[in-house]
Every structure is written in C-alpha cells, then in structure tokens.
Image (spheres, grey):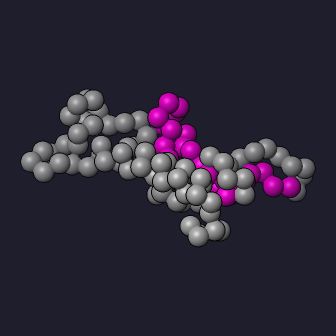
Amino acid sequence: MCNAADMSLGIRVLLAAEGLMTATFLLNLVVDVGFDTTWYVRYRMGNPKWVNNLCTFGEAGVVKTGKDGKLGDRGVPCVFVRYSGTHSADTVRMWNPSTGQV
C-alpha cells in the first residue's frame, strides 16, 4: 500500500473528509455521560441501519468488479473510508489506491 507521504494533497484532503464523515456517523453511537442510551437512539428512536455492519476506517477489502475470464481477478483491492448514508445498510464507500478514486 502507500502512506500519506506518497499521496497527493487532493487525495489526502479527500480521505480526511471521508474520515470526518465516518467519525460523525460513529459519534452518534457513543453513550453520553448521564444517559443510558446513545444520542441517535434518543432522538431518532432506534439505531441506524448500518450499526450491525461496523467497519474500521482504513480496513482493506475487495470490491467485486466482475469476472475476468475463468481464472482472472474478480475484484479490486480497496480501502474502507465511509458508510453510505443513502444506500442499504451493507453499502460502504471504498477508496481505490490504484486509481485514487472513491
């Protein structure tokens, strides 16, 4: 893989923004002092749909792209950056290091 010194400024800004979105999502799951439930449960009346599919920021995974012949690659290695707020619970945003796109 690569480290931050190998990345362009645009990629670092993009990943920082995605990381902040992930932190915001997860902050809603933290139990506040003086309460027995999370903010999200108190004000939205239940846990978010993606709470059962939690991932670690920067976790590696393979995004399925299709079949490339009988023995070819079926996916591209990517890095988890954020949960998708507008899709199903198991949909996440992944960063592809080889293309630099999310």
> Looking at the image, which is closer to me, 45 or 39?
39
What residue is shown at x 51% (from left), y 38% (from top)?
84
What residue is shown at x 54% (from left), y 43% (from top)?
92
In the rendered image, is residue 51 in sight?
Answer: yes
The spot of residue 36 in percent (x, y) is 14, 45
Q: Is residue 94 magenta?
A: yes
- Residue 85 vertical placement versus 95 (above, below): above
- Residue 50 vertical placement versus 54 (above, below): above
> Looking at the image, which is closer to me, 86 or 14?
14
Q: Residue furthest right?
A: 69
The spot of residue 35 in percent (x, y) is 12, 45
Image quadrant assignment for residue 47: top left
55 sits to left or right of 74: left
Q: Residue furthest front?
A: 9
Q: Is residue 41 magenta?
A: no
Looking at the rendering, the stretch of residues picked out in magenta corresponds to: 72-97
The spot of residue 33 in percent (x, y) is 13, 51
In the rendered image, is residue 55 in sight?
Answer: no
Quadrant in which the N terminus is drawn? bottom right
63 sits to left or right of 35: right
What residue is shown at x 62% (from left), y 46% (from top)?
102
The spot of residue 2 in percent (x, y) is 63, 68
2 sits to left or right of 66: left
